[in-house]
Amino acid sequence: MTRLLAGLRTIVYVAAFALFWGWLAVNARRYDAALGSPLPPWLGPLGVVCIALGAVLVGTCVVLFVARGRGTPAPFDPPRQFVAAGPYRLVRNPMYVGGVLVLGGIGMWQRSPGILLLALVGMLAAHLFVTLVEEPGLARRFGDGYRECTRTVRRWLPKWP
């Protein structure tokens, strides 16, 4: 029953989050003319690939948070168990990476410099939130397990062999 409730809460939170960023993206398009000409057409297919990869990454993280973490992605309803599986073995913040891939992909697909700029601002906001709020909180909540993760897993980009 607890997982079912976490799943339902997660659906609501993820939908609200997606609608919020979608609303921001629609409004960012109004700045396209001021930011210059549309992006080149060849970025469209690359944008679709980014959207698909980002959506799969976010979806995988959401499922892991509910199934293994017994919580949701929302900062006010976080997982109760530390999740270090799946994409979290490669980077510490794959959900943010996936979200930026989706938003940046939409910007490329729509050839919108405004949406692409919003994706960059979103990444900067995520970096500040992660470094100033989220990581100190995770270190307090999960202790040595999280600290070990910070020593072996990079924040944004995976280590390549």
Image (tube, rainbow, N blue to C red):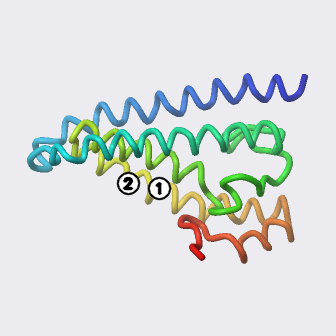
Identify which residue is drawn at 77% across, 57% down.
84
Image coordinates for residue 132, horizontal then vertical, percent: 60, 65
Quick one: label 2, few (<14), some, or many (20+) residues within 10 Å?
Answer: few
Image coordinates for residue 46, horizontal then vertical, percent: 32, 46
- In front of the other: 101 or 2: 101
Q: In the picture provided, is 143 more to the left or to the right than 16?
A: right
Tell me if residue 111 comes above or below residue 158 in the rendering. above
Q: In the picture provided, is 110 more to the left or to the right than 16?
A: left
Mark 2 and mark 1 in contact? Answer it, CB < 8 Å: yes
Tell me if residue 131 comes above or below residue 3 in the rendering. below
- Indicate which disc residue 87 carries: none
Image coordinates for residue 30, horizontal then vertical, percent: 19, 35
The C terminus, quarter of image = bottom right
The N terminus, quarter of image = top right
- Indicate which disc residue 121 carries: 2
Q: Quadrant of residue 90?
A: bottom right
Quick one: label 1, few (<14), some, or many (20+) residues within 10 Å?
Answer: few
Q: Quadrant of residue 159?
A: bottom right
- In front of the other: 119 or 102: 102
Identify which residue is drawn at 60% across, 31% down.
14
Image coordinates for residue 100, horizontal then vertical, percent: 45, 49
For this orientation, the residue located farthest to the front is 161
Residue type at tag 2: Val
Distance between mark 2 and mark 1 Cα atoms: 6 Å
> Element at badge 2?
helix
Q: In the picture provided, is 66 more to the left or to the right than 143?
A: left
- In front of the other: 101 or 77: 101
Identify which residue is drawn at 79% across, 44% down.
79
Identify which residue is drawn at 25% across, 41% down.
44
Mark 1 highlights which residue?
125
Residue type at tag 1: Ala
